[in-house]
């Protein structure tokens, strides 16, 4: 049976075009339309669609309010449409926080004539978030309730990557051991007693919420530098970095060329560009990148540059996302002795990128999203 989609938009043109694009795929059928957020809530309850596409700026009830109401009454995978402006990015991040699973930039040009690649991406995203299965209301993390401690306005002095002293080695887990999600001892044992010098995290679909969940759990005195790669357009990474910096105790910044890599700071790769670690492992370069590389930013590009700069003593994590970006970068990291963690299937929005790494035999531990921040906080 085809996937049933409810299309929510106050524009008759966009409703019609979204239906035409989606139904070019025989596995997708539009089961209904809603012209505003209030109508969307009613239709979601009546039609019980498999997926909802949601505009954010509508009369009577806006898209974010509609997402919250639907997730409370009839939890459903929701794909948000948003503009590519900074304000559109901010609203989209709020919608993801409210329970939407993914987003897609919306423009008249992308929906007019033959949308080509835009049509394929829309169809793929609808199919991907449908495979997520039953959606449950997302609890608000306890850490989000308390305001983070004030951060210093002046940047901390630049220092090289922290030294990596040996700690008492833990016994290696048996080769046949790991279940679907590793136990705490197994996750920490995967580091083989090595204190990492650098943390790398890559994500795509579902990543904004996952990264926020992880980083909000880290203490202000977190002793390691972090490089983040999230598939996003440029205006989105600017808004996302500002949001994370506001919500987290550590410092979060959209990376700029020559930004130093320092403990307790997370640098987010800017959308539309590539972020590389320099040869000494002490600063990042931000470059335009090659059009032949599908993703900008790319997890593979950042992970690969780190593998060349810092041998071993790197902890890399691959989180929820479509496709296999990160797999080749993890191969390079593993050859240098790095440790790789992947998000488990149950907590992923789309189990694509982590699965690619795990099935290639590169994952040292499979971790539930709720545990990532806790384990990272225990690394000292």
Image (cartoon, rainbow, N blue to C red):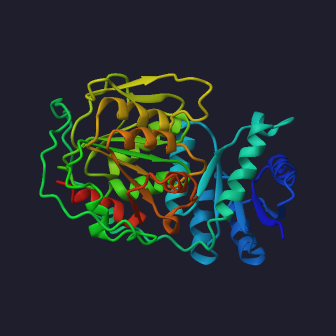
Q: Is residue 145 left or right of residue 150?
A: right
Query: Which residue lies at the image location 16% right of the left edge and 31% below the top edge?
Result: 159
Residue ranking furthest to the front: 175
Left-right relation of 129 to 380: right
Can residue 265 be seen from the camera position used here? yes
**Most foreground residue, 161 or 123:** 161
Compared to residue 233, the image places residue 6 above or below, namely: below
**Residue at horizontal 21%, vertical 60%?**
378
Number of marks in the rendered image:
0
Question: Does the image show residue 147?
Answer: no
Looking at the picture, tell me which residue is in the foreground, 47 or 116.
116
Please provide percent x and percent y for residue 196: 24, 46
Residue under the image location 23 percent in, 36 percent down: 262
The residue positioned 29% from the left and 35% from the top of the image is 311
Q: Position of residue 88 (x, y in %)?
A: 57, 43
Q: Position of residue 313 (x, y in %)?
A: 26, 43
Quadrant of residue 68 within the rendered picture: bottom right
The N terminus, quarter of image: bottom right
Nearest the eye: 135 or 105: 135
Q: Nearer the viewer, residue 295 or 342?
A: 342
Q: In the rendered view, tell whether residue 191 sits above or below residue 255.
A: below
């Amino acid at each position: 049976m085809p996937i049933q989609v409810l299309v929510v938009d106050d524009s008759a043109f966009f409703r019609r075009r979204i239906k035409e694009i989606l139904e070019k795929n025989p596995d997708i059928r539009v089961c209904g339309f809603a012209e505003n957020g209030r109508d969307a809530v009613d239709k979601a309850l009546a039609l019980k669609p498999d997926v909802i596409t949601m505009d954010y700026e509508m009369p009577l009830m806006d898209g974010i309010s509609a997402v919250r109401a639907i997730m409370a009454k009839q939890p459903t995978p929701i794909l948000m449409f948003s503009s590519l402006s900074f304000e559109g990015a901010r609203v989209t991040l709020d919608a993801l926080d409210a329970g939407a699973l993914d987003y897609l930039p919306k423009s008249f040009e992308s929906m007019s004539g033959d949308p080509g690649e835009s049509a394929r991406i829309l169809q793929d995203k609808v199919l991907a978030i449908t495979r997520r299965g039953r959606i449950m209301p997302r609890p608000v993390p306890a850490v989000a309730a308390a305001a983070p401690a004030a951060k210093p306005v002046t940047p901390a002095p630049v220092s090289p990557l922290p030294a990596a002293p040996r700690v008492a080695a833990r016994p290696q887990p048996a080769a046949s051991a790991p279940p679907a999600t590793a136990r705490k001892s197994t996750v920490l044992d995967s580091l083989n007693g090595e204190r990492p010098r650098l943390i790398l995290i890559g994500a795509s679909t579902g990543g904004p919420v996952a990264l926020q969940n992880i980083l909000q759990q880290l203490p202000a005195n977190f002793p390691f530098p972090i490089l983040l790669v999230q598939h996003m357009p440029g205006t989105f990474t600017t808004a996302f970095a500002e949001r994370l910096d506001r919500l987290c105790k550590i410092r979060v910044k959209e990376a700029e060329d020559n930004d130093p890599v320092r403990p307790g700071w997370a640098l987010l790769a800017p959308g539309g560009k590539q972020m590389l670690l320099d040869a000494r492992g002490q600063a990042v370069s931000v470059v335009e990148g090659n059009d032949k590389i599908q993703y900008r930013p790319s997890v593979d590009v950042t992970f690969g540059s780190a593998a060349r700069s810092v041998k071993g003593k790197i902890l890399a994590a691959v989180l929820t996302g479509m496709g296999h970006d990160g797999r080749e970068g993890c191969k390079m990291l593993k050859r240098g002795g790095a440790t790789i963690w992947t998000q488990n299937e149950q907590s992923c929005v789309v189990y694509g990128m982590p699965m690619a790494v795990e099935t290639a035999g590169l994952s040292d531990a499979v971790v539930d999203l709720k545990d990532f921040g806790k384990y990272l906080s225990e690394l000292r």
